[in-house]
Image (cartoon, rainbow, N blue to C red):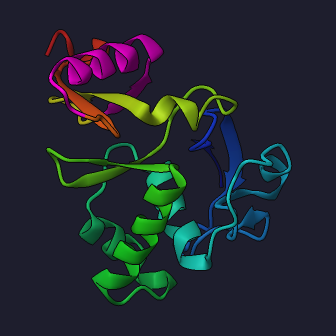
């Protein structure tokens, strides 16, 4: 069957075929880049990923909600993952590349859904996540005005801000009536 996931870098839909037997993706999936080969041609900014990094990134990109490291491990056992350390090493590099975020309050991870590939690196100074407490969906916000305001607040307090992550909890529009 053909499925659609959103690119973790540009949020554009990527159409790929999933193996119905659960052993991963069909051959058009580029495991090194964590996306379909056709879509990867459009992404010069995508870092080269190891097999484990690509599998972890693929699991996060196709997930409907944030995943813990142990949930990722369970999902990838059929692909040869045996120990949590394999997942944590992959996550560490994906975080370093800026294509995955850690949600501190949930101790879980999400693929970056920043809407603009071109300004991706510049906009990670301040990232906010809207987390729906009803359905678990997460929306990412990267806003230069927010970054500037947080830098100003930190400066006023004589604090050198390197990075800030804001987690907003509430209900998404789809869950307002529930």
- Residue 139 shows up from this direction: no
Q: Is residue 65 magenta?
A: no
* The C terminus - image quarter: top left
Q: Nearer the viewer, residue 19 or 149?
A: 149
Front in this rendered view, residue 23 or 42: 42
Queried whether the magenta region covers residue 143, the answer comes back as yes
Looking at the picture, does residue 138 appear above or below residue 157?
below
Q: Is residue 18 left or right of residue 71?
A: right
Instruction: Please state which of residues 4 and 31 is positioned toward the viewer in this rendering.
Output: 31
Residue 147 % position (x, y): 38, 21
Give x and y (percent) for residue 105: 14, 44
Left or right placement of residue 162 versus residue 167 in this view: right
Residue drawn 64% across and 34% down?
Answer: 10
Image height of 112 relative to 153, above or below: below
**Snapshot quadrant of residue 76:** bottom left
Which contiguous range is marked in magenta? 137-159
Task: Inspect this view and state whether residue 37 appears.
Answer: yes
Residue at image location 15% in from the left, 30% down from the top? 133
Which image quadrant for residue 128? Answer: top left
Q: Is residue 79 left or right of residue 75?
A: right
Question: Which picture quadrant has residue 26?
Answer: bottom right
Vertical arrangement, residue 39 with respect to residue 153, above or below = below
* Residue under the point 31% across and 75% down: 74
């Amino acid at each position: 069957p053909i499925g659609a996931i959103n690119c973790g870098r540009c949020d554009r839909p990527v159409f790929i075929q999933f193996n119905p037997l659960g052993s991963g993706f069909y051959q058009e999936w580029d495991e090194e880049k964590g996306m379909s080969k056709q879509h990867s041609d459009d992404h010069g900014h995508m870092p080269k990923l190891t097999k484990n990094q690509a599998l972890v990134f693929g699991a996060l990109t196709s997930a409907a909600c944030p995943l813990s490291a142990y949930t990722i491990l369970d999902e990838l056992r059929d692909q040869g993952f045996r120990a949590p350390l394999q997942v944590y090493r992959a996550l560490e590099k994906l975080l370093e590349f800026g294509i995955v975020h850690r949600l501190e309050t949930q101790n879980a991870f999400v693929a970056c859904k920043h809407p603009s590939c071109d300004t991706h690196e510049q906009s990670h100074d301040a990232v906010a996540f809207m987390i729906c407490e009803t359905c678990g969906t997460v929306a990412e916000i990267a806003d230069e005005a927010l970054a500037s305001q947080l830098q100003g607040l930190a400066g006023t307090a004589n604090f050198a801000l390197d990075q800030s992550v804001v987690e907003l909890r509430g209900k998404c529009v789809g869950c307002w009536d529930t």
